[in-house]
Image: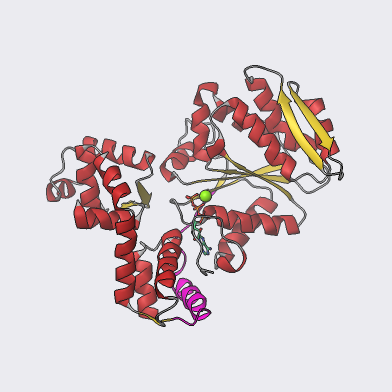
């Protein structure tokens, strides 16, 4: 079996490092503060948070994990959120009671099959789920928390709350959180510019409501050791320089490092025992080739300005609003660049760290470099 894993939450032996980050998140939450975790796409937020959940649960906290990307209406929110709460209940009867008592228009159902396994479900009695019902669902963890340990709710892809804008959901959630004393929140998401705006803009409901933490890439030295260990288990050697080359080709992004390593492993497993830079380059090209149709279509779909900007970003992502940058890459006014950047950020095609912009997928970057 391929010892590298990407595209899913990594656990156990597939997960490495992030020790300090994990401790910091655990202590912030267990000390009773809310936290927002920023990081570009595919840096390992969700995997880290699952590790955090394990640690918090060892300490006796109940953790509810909910992914906002599944939400597109109040109904999907209420349904999904109640099921997320249910997953962490050892006593379903208690949940049924709490829903009956506190969430007026939701009818819980609990049935048992012949083997005694319980099955939980809910029925929504409103044709259109109301904002009141959503508010009552939001308060459910608070109502159900007993004892001294508070509940921790984790909202992943939190920026997607924007899909409920028409209901003023952001304000609703904020005021509900403010009144709760037994529940703490961890917010995370991949569109850092949207999250930043939510938590740092004075006019937004979540302004100043949580501690901030920025997640960086994994330390390269640890990644080298991880790669060497995984390859060696299959009788394959990779020296430090080649491992660093692999990391560089993957844009130093955890997901793409494992994607490229998996491709290399697959290519070598039955024939060779030493990873060389040539093999790394060959496998990089192979990934680009395999996705060529998709990349072609993706690039084609961009406006002229976005295309020009993407080509410029292949070369540099610093000072993109400066006059020199416009001149060097023959771009137009800063306001047009700003607009193109926002569209590309919103579509997840580019990302931002500090003041530098970069193409999120290093293989798409390579495609643009080679073909566009
Ligand atoms: N600590 C880690 N150890 C090993 N691999 C990791 C680690 N963190 C991330 N990865 C790699 O990155 C991939 C993506 O991780 P994860 O889904 O946790 O990231 P994410 O930031 O939540 O991504 P998205 O922005 O898509 O939600 C994993 O499948 C794995 O290949
Ligand atoms: Mg994630």
- Image location (x, y in percent) of residue 64: 68, 44
Q: Nearer the viewer, residue 159 or 249?
A: 249
Quarter containing the N terminus: bottom right
Residue at figure coordinates x 32%, y 52% from the top left: 359
Residue at figure coordinates x 74%, y 51% from the top left: 61
Question: From which residue to which does the magenta span run?
Answer: 212-236
Q: Which quarter of the picture shows residue 104?
A: top right
Residue at figure coordinates x 66%, y 36% from the top left: 81
Say above or below: 8 vs 90. Answer: below
Q: Is residue 230 visible?
A: yes
Q: Nearer the viewer, residue 61 or 64?
A: 64
- Image location (x, y in percent) of residue 314: 24, 55
Q: Nearer the viewer, residue 322 or 98?
A: 98
Left or right: 212 in relation to 119: left
How was the colour assigned to the protein in this rendering?
Answer: secondary structure
Q: Is residue 334 visible?
A: no
Q: Which quarter of the picture shows residue 278?
A: bottom left
Say above or below: 335 vs 277. Answer: above
Count of residue discs: 0
Q: Nearer the viewer, residue 75 or 199?
A: 75
In the image, residue 220 lies in the stretch drawn in magenta:
yes
Residue at figure coordinates x 34%, y 79% from the top left: 276
- Image location (x, y in percent) of residue 366: 27, 58
């Amino acid at each position: 079996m391929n010892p590298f894993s990407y595209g899913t939450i990594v656990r156990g032996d597939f997960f490495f490092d992030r020790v300090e980050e994990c401790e910091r998140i655990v202590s912030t939450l267990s000390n009773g503060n809310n936290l927002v975790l920023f990081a570009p796409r595919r840096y390992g937020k969700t995997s880290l948070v699952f590790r955090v959940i394990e640690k918090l649960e060892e300490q006796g906290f109940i953790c509810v994990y909910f992914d906002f990307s599944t939400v597109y209406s109040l109904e999907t929110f209420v349904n999904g959120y109640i099921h997320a709460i249910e997953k962490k209940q050892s006593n379903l009867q208690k949940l049924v009671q709490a829903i009956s008592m506190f969430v007026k228009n939701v009818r819980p159902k609990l049935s048992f099959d012949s083997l005694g396994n319980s099955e939980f479900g809910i029925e929504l009695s409103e044709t259109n789920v109301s904002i009141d019902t959503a508010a009552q669902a939001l308060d459910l963890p608070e109502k159900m928390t007993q004892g001294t340990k508070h509940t921790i709710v984790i909202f992943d892809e939190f920026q997607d709350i924007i899909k409920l804008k028409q209901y003023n959901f952001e304000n609703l959630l904020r005021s509900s959180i403010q009144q709760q004393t037994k529940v703490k929140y961890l917010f995370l998401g991949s569109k850092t510019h949207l999250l930043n705006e939510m938590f740092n803009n004075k006019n937004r409901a979540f302004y100043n409501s949580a501690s901030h933490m920025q997640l960086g890439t994994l330390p390269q030295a640890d990644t080298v050791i991880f790669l060497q260990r995984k390859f060696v288990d299959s009788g394959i050697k990779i020296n430090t320089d080649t491992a660093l080359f692999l990391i560089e080709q993957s844009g130093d992004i955890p997901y793409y490092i494992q994607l490229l390593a998996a491709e290399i492993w697959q290519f070598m497993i039955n024939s060779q025992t030493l990873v060389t830079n040539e093999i790394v380059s060959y496998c990089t090209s192979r990934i680009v080739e395999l996705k060529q149709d998709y990349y072609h279509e993706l690039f084609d779909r961009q406006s002229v300005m976005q295309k020009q900007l993407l080509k410029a970003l292949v070369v540099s992502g610093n000072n993109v609003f400066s006059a020199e940058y416009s001149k060097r890459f023959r771009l137009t006014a800063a306001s047009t660049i700003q607009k193109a950047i926002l569209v590309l950020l919103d579509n997840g095609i580019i990302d931002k760290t500090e003041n530098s912009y970069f193409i999120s997928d290093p293989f798409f970057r390579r495609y643009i470099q080679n073909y566009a």
